[in-house]
């Protein structure tokens, strides 16, 4: 008899003989009846065995996760189960075949399992049997289909790029693969297909996409793995608006189909400087209106030496006004928080509208100074409780520290609507970031990002002033994709490499295969890379990207189930011309 998919069954099948196969979810005896919930990849259905000899005895032997095949007649359930799709029916069984038995389980196969994460990683094949995990992996499969359909229908070509490639400096440590045929030499695993997709544009493929595996040898965390997946896209002969519009329509489609997103309006665009000044982050969460403000004018009349000194030195003063009166204890906790993010302290006062009293460090410096008091009263009034929290320092650090505090305040005191999907574009990024300690510039995105025409003139004189034609797409405080227009002029590409401290010999050694292609006609082009794991984490409301990857690495970058990485035999290492030092543990 042909196997019946469980969730294909309904009351319409009443009276039919069917055959189902799957895993025993649970079994229970009630008098002369045994009820067995059997599960396949689509769902669960109830089987019923009555006290009729050998079949009943066989059903009594069933335990959780036994694999079985059973045939029987579909009947209507007297006690219906609204929690499952097949809850209107059950199957009165006339045969049972135990295909495979299960040992005692190390974890519960149910959505609310009590298993620790290391147990889930070690027994991932069991963890993936849980319906919640099954649904996440199926959602990811649906994401892939939507992606392929959209880009294929819009004229994009799906092209694979190499996994074994040349090490190039792209911001993270490379995974290296030793070569046996060229002893002492190494391939690297790609941090991204960046150079290859640009070479494909030079090759004349106007529209490229790929769902690509990429690798970065860095510490894992909730939203990052050493091995992860990105949707890689590149387009030629398109303006920045045309590229962003194409990508925006794709994002809307994905979230409409997988996340019940109903928005149709254009995504808001915020400049990098505006994002930092207003939200304290280059990936702002705009679901709540708790904003950073410039505090220099407010503080000008406060007679405190370090404040006056900071203003005279053009330091940044940023503040947040929270519509809630905080206690001294709250302030101490929040000050410890911002200090853990590098701030020197947290300037604070709170106002009680019922007593008209100010409290906190700043209170006396405001109330005892007529000009300062008038200014604060004019700005904030005295009709409602509120608290004022400020940080002084260098611009970027101050914005980031107060931005972190903004998120902490929202977690503690605000109710944020988690059903909202606030997409924004962050644009007009700096091209370079300067490190005061090393006195070197680094790329904010990557070395192939095109400067704006208005600021390219500063490449020779003041690279810190150069802005880029870069754009990140942000959802509720998470960056889900980052892209830019690319440099398509050889002289400009050389200049950017040189600003980053690469000599002509280093450029030739690291990028000759790429830069040589600039001799033969390069189209204007641009693209983006989306973080597939991060997008699926958001869509499935998962706590970690590990929950949306079939076989992820642990937080320490280890494959727990396979026990990898692992030691290699001496003869294999000899073939690769590798010697393990005595002081290396393992």
Image (tube, grey):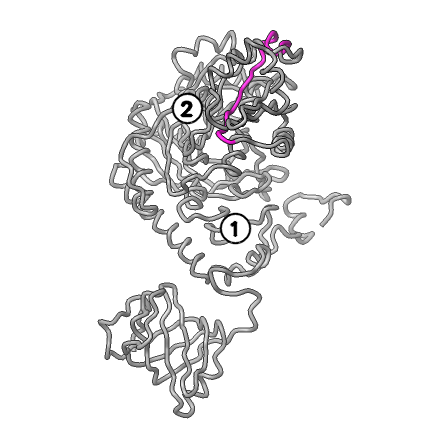
- Residue extending farthest left: 12
450 lies left or right of 342? left
* The N terminus: image quadrant: bottom left
- Secondary structure, mark 1, is loop
Pointer 2: residues within 10 angstroms few (<14), some, or many (20+)?
Answer: many
Residue hosting label 2: 470
> What range is drawn magenta here?
308-324
x, y percent for residue 194: 44, 32
Question: In front: 155, or 544?
Answer: 544
Residue position marked by numbered label 1 in the rendering: 552
Residue at point 29%, 71% (across, down): 88
| Residue 513 in sight from this viewpoint | no
Residue lying furthest bottom: 53
Inspect this view and state whether residue 14 appears.
yes
Badge 1 density bin: few <14, some 14–19, many ≥20, Cα 10 Å: many
Q: Is residue 225 above or below residue 237?
A: below
| SS for callout 2 | strand
43 or 338, which lies in front? 338
Q: Nearer the viewer, residue 212 or 263?
A: 263
The answer for how far apart the CA atoms under marks 2 and 1 are is: 30 Å
Please tell me the numbered disc located at residue 447.
none
Residue lying at 32% horizontally and 48% vertically, measured from the top left:
145
């Amino acid at each position: 008899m042909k196997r019946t998919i469980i969730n294909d069954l309904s009351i319409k099948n009443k009276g039919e003989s069917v055959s189902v196969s799957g895993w025993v979810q649970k079994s229970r005896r009630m008098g002369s009846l045994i009820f067995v919930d059997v599960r396949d990849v689509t769902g669960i259905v109830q089987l019923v065995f009555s006290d009729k000899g050998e079949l009943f005895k066989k059903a009594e032997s069933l335990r959780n996760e036994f694999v079985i095949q059973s045939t029987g007649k579909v009947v209507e359930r007297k006690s219906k189960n609204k929690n499952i799709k097949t809850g209107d029916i059950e199957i009165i069984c006339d045969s049972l075949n135990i295909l495979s038995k299960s040992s005692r389980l190390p974890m519960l196969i149910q959505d609310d399992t009590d298993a620790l994460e290391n147990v889930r990683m070690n027994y991932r094949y069991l963890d993936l049997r849980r319906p919640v995990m099954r649904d996440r992996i199926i959602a990811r499969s649906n994401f892939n289909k939507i992606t392929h359909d959209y880009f294929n229908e819009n004229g994009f070509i799906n092209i694979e790029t190499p996994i074994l490639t040349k090490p190039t400096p792209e911001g993270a440590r490379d995974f290296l693969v030793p070569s046996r045929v060229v002893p002492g030499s190494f391939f690297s695993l790609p941090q991204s297909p960046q150079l290859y997709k640009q070479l494909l544009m030079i090759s004349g493929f106007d529209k490229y996409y790929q769902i690509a595996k990429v690798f970065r040898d860095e510490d894992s965390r909730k939203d990052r793995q050493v091995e992860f997946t990105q949707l890689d896209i590149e387009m030629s002969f398109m303006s920045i608006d045309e590229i962003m519009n194409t990508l925006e329509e794709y994002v809307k489609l994905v979230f409409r189909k997988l996340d019940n997103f109903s928005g149709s309006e254009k995504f808001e665009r915020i400049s990098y400087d505006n994002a930092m000044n207003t939200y304290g982050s280059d990936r702002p969460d705009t679901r709540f209106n708790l904003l950073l403000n410039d505090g220099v004018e407010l503080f000008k009349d406060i007679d405190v030496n370090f404040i006056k000194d900071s203003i005279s030195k053009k330091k940044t003063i940023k503040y947040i006004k929270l519509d809630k009166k905080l206690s001294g204890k709250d302030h101490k906790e929040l000050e410890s928080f911002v200090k853990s993010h590098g701030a020197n302290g947290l300037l604070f006062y709170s106002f009680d509208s019922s007593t008209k009293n100010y409290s906190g460090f700043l209170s006396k410096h405001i109330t005892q100074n007529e000009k300062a008091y008038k200014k604060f009263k004019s700005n904030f009034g005295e009709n409602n409780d509120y608290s004022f929290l400020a940080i002084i320092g260098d611009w970027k650090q101050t914005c980031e520290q107060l931005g972190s505090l903004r998120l902490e305040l929202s977690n503690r005191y605000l109710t944020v609507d988690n059903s909202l999907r606030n997409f924004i574009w962050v644009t007009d990024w700096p091209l370079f970031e300067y490190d005061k300690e090393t006195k070197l510039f680094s790329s904010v995105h990557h070395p192939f990002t095109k400067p704006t025409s208005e600021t390219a003139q500063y490449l020779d004189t003041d690279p810190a002033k150069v802005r880029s034609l870069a754009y990140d797409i942000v959802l509720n405080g998470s960056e889900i994709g980052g892209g830019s227009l690319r440099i398509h002029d050889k002289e400009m590409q050389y200049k950017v490499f040189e600003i980053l401290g690469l000599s002509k010999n280093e450029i030739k050694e690291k990028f000759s295969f790429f830069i040589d292609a600039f001799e033969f006609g390069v189209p204007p082009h641009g693209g983006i890379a989306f973080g597939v794991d991060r997008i699926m984490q958001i869509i499935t409301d998962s706590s970690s990207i590990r929950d949306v990857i079939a076989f992820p690495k642990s937080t320490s970058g280890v494959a727990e189930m396979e026990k990898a990485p692992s030691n290699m035999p001496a003869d294999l290492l000899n073939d690769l011309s590798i010697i393990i030092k005595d002081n290396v543990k393992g």
